[in-house]
Image (cartoon, rainbow, N blue to C red):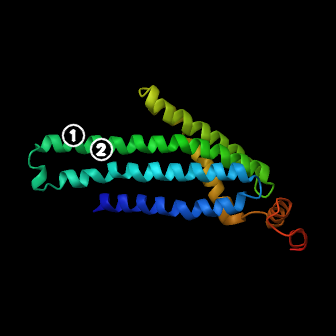
Amino acid sequence: MLYRWGFAVELFYCVCNVPLTVIFYNLFKVVNRNVTLMMVILDLVVNTIESVSLLGHYAPLLLLNGGHHLSAFTPEQLQAASYVSIELFEHGFAIALFFFGFDCFAMAYLIYKSTFMPRIIGVLLTIEGVGYLVNSSALFLVPALQPRIFAYFAPTALAEIALCLWLLVMGVNVQRWKEKAGAAGYLPPRYAMHS
């Protein structure tokens, strides 16, 4: 049951990414609409790959629960197939993280240029994007090095933590956001100046 709950939480996480993407679109379109659209597309690609790779997470439940249609396979074959399906899930997640590295670059640029959020978060997201690209590339190109490379880039998650904490605790500088929105034509200039 704990394994099933783990799957359900991951599925819920993927669903939550959709409204989060809409929120980020509305937040950052005032900075650069094209880069924001690229970020949205990358977000959707990442979420789609991650969601599909969840099939590999769920497959062991189907394989190991038996059933008449699986009686042609030995328990050892079913266990091996279950292990391979989990590895496929992990590799699918690594593919999603490769795209997420580019997503980090887009968001880093938008934050750095925004003026309504700290630039340091943009810098940290750039470092995180490099970390995800190197780690995923190592998994596919030089698998023996991947665990060591991951150890060096594990702290890159600080960018995501910093971004979440900043948005939860401090939020965005509303006046600067309104100025950007007014300059980009998303707010009437009078509203942007007097709000």
Q: Which residue is mark 2?
A: 85
Query: Is 61 above or below relative to 76?
Result: below
What residue lies at 49% left-to-right and 36% top-to-bottom?
A: 136
Q: Which residue is mark 1?
A: 80
Residue type for callout 2: Ser
Query: Is 148 above or below relative to 13?
Result: above
Q: Nearer the viewer, residue 172 or 180?
A: 180
How far across and down, in percent of the image, does residue 88 sit?
A: 35, 42
Residue 121 seen in render: no
Q: Residues within 10 Å of mark 1 (few under 14, many from 20)?
A: few
What residue lies at 42% left-to-right and 28% top-to-bottom?
A: 143
What residue lies at 79% left-to-right and 67% top-to-bottom?
A: 174
Quadrant placement of the C terminus: bottom right
Q: Is residue 98 left or right of residue 74?
A: right
Q: Is residue 51 left or right of residue 17?
A: left
Mark 2 or mark 1: name the one nearer the start of the chain: 1
How far across and down, in percent of the image, does residue 149 sit?
A: 51, 31
Residue 39 seen in render: yes
Residue type for callout 1: Ala
Q: Is residue 50 left or right of residue 177?
A: left
How far across and down, in percent of the image, does residue 147 sit?
A: 45, 33
Quadrant placement of the N terminus: bottom left
Q: Residues within 10 Å of mark 2 (few under 14, many from 20)?
A: many
Q: CA distance from mark 2 to mark 1?
A: 9 Å
